[in-house]
Image: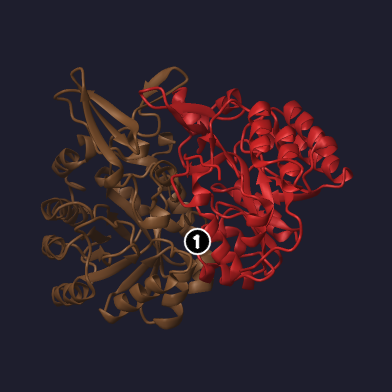
Amino acid sequence: MTRGALELVCPAGTPSALRAAVNAGADTVYCGLRDETNARNFPGLNFSDAELAEAVTYAHERGAKVMVAINTFAQAGRVAIWARAVDAAAAAGADAIIAADMAVLGRAASHHPDVRLHLSVQAAAGTPEAIRFYVERFGVQRVVLPRILSIPEIKALIGEIDIEVEVFAFGGLCVMTEGRCDLSSYVTGRSPNLDGVCSPPEAVSYSRQDGSRSVALGGLTIDRQADGQPLGYPTLCKGRFVAGGKTAHLFEDPVSLNTIDVLPQLLDAGVSALKIEGRQRGKAYVEAVTRQFRQAIDALGGPDGPAAAGAAMLNTMAEGQRGTVGAYKKTWR
Amino acid sequence: MAVNPTPISLSLGPLYFNWPSAQLLDFYAEIADECPVDRVYLGEIVCGKRGPLTQAAVASAAERLERAGKTVIWSTLISPVNRRERRLTEDLVRDGEHVELNDFGGLASRGGAAFTAGPFLNVYNEDTAAMLQEMGWTRWCPPVELSLQAISQIAGRCPGLEVELFGFGRLPLAHSGRCYHARQHKLNRDSCRYVCEQDPDGCRVSTLDGTAFLAFNGVQTLSDGLQLCTQTPETLRMAGISALRLSPHSIGTVEVANALRQFIDGASSAAEMVEAVRASTLPLPLVNGYLAGKAGLEWTME
């Protein structure tokens, strides 16, 4: 059902965002259930079982697919909650389940072998050996690659594996390897792997002093700007810190991933699907980004390549209003 | 509950930092001669680029440690990327000796032979644990963010599993494709000049208010604070813990091991142990919040 050379996989934090993505040209929409089983466990987001079933019907009627992210790690003594989520996704008619934890993958493989299983980026499987392990053990049919590989490395990797590869194409960029970061729990007690949240809102506080505003997480100052200057959300790895006498964005600048200029290279590398990050973003954002990527994918192979105007427009939507190709370019490291 | 009936042993985890060969040889000679640890994990696990620099020194340290009666276990790269790094991991995995795996890639060709799961394998629940046990898993150093209660719950469902708790050292919190030492020096990872060698325990990261809270070590981010497990041996045994893992630091590792050994043997109180650790190691805050299910940077003593 994919319309272009690359499957466009778009985020939906709410049923209305899902409908917007489908109507703007998404081949596939991914979403999560309303609990800690998915990595965007924020208040006001995600789907009830009934909403998920309706969303699947809506998408299928319009030729689009729905994938359900059950991509956190089941907590000790509470695995039944994750097993229930897997069963609910299957019952709703989801086209695929995206998972990282062996317990979740195992549940899906043993109870719902007819539902496609995708390996979440949270599994941090970046080598043929790691991917092979999940293929042999759980029958995963697609891997979402960790954002640590350059495009030539992705091409080489694809040459060594037999399953589809999905890569992140746009949106917020974890600078740490997903699934391998405890910074948030070190400061706040809650983390992506444990709770499906990073730098959670309840730990955020703002203050103002001497003409500047500060933002803190768990009482630690993450950034400070003069009044009138933008102060971003205090995601730990995006803060300004001091090391070796220098003050800087030590880990990552406030930028977003934007691959629109390297789509031909990703296609050439053998990538099957492009993932847009942003289940926490609003419907208008999802709609606009989906539309731009739809056009860019449809233009691939055409005389002009992916629309250059789209790249500029997308950068205005990016965090910090600046785009980067991140690890896809080797020098990012 | 899987109560561990035997005394708690101490082990020394893999070195995270880029130490020159001479320092590495001196360190492990001291461990061999004076440190009350039974097991020592060796091998470069943080950065595949560093491995060749100290290969000979590490091999010689392994011999030295084994002559002193220590059990040496090779630990694999957290994130192998290129062919050389992948082959190195595969060689360790296939060689048949006990190995510590830090990436699930190692499991594909392990063939059911016994292995230790390092803290970088995402084992968060009893179902995942049960699957790993079927694959030959015999020892576990849990992810550092897990609480003692969660660890005990998982261990309780895994009869025969040895649990080695991360007991001392800067906590390994995150791994990245990007090298922060290189970035700090306006280089990139492929042209890094091995600048991480300048910080033998990692480079301290502070907030704009001057509160230190993290440290970077090449592609790795650690806690600034030193984890110190102050649970009594009875509490640890009740939770199914059989060993405490110390993480190598440039100062005081042997003294810390001695202090923990005395505490576990009932020869000193927790307060005396903490005092001895503070006196001998790096001047960094102590932390242990994770074990109580709190933010990792918190510190509490019962």
Q: Which chain is brown?
A: A
Look at 57% across and 71% down and name the residue there: B131
Residue A18 lies left or right of residue B124; in this view the side is left
- Please tell me which residue lies in front, A228 or B258: B258
Based on the displayed image, in which of its 4 quarters is residue A81 positioned? bottom left
Describe the colour scheme in one phrase.
by chain
- Please tell me which residue lies in front, B201 or B209: B209
Which residue position holds label 1? B124
- Please tell me which residue lies in front, A306 or A227: A227
**Mark 1, other Cα within 10 Å: few <14 / some 14–19 / many ≥20:** many
Q: Where's residue A106, x and y in %?
A: 47, 74
- Please tell me which residue lies in front, A40 or B166: B166
Q: Where's residue B160, x and y in %?
A: 69, 69
Q: Chain of mark 1?
A: B
Look at 18% across and 18% down and name the residue there: A211
Residue A18 lies left or right of residue B145; in this view the side is left
Q: Which chain is red?
A: B
A6 lies above or below A237: below
On-image quarter of the N terminus of chain B: bottom right
Q: Where's residue B116, x and y in %?
A: 66, 58
A265 lies above or below A249: below
On-image quarter of the C terminus of chain B: top right
Look at 78% across and 31% down and name the residue there: B25
Name the residue type under label 1: Tyr
Q: Where's residue A39, x and y in %?
A: 34, 57
Residue B58 lies left or right of residue A330; in this view the side is right
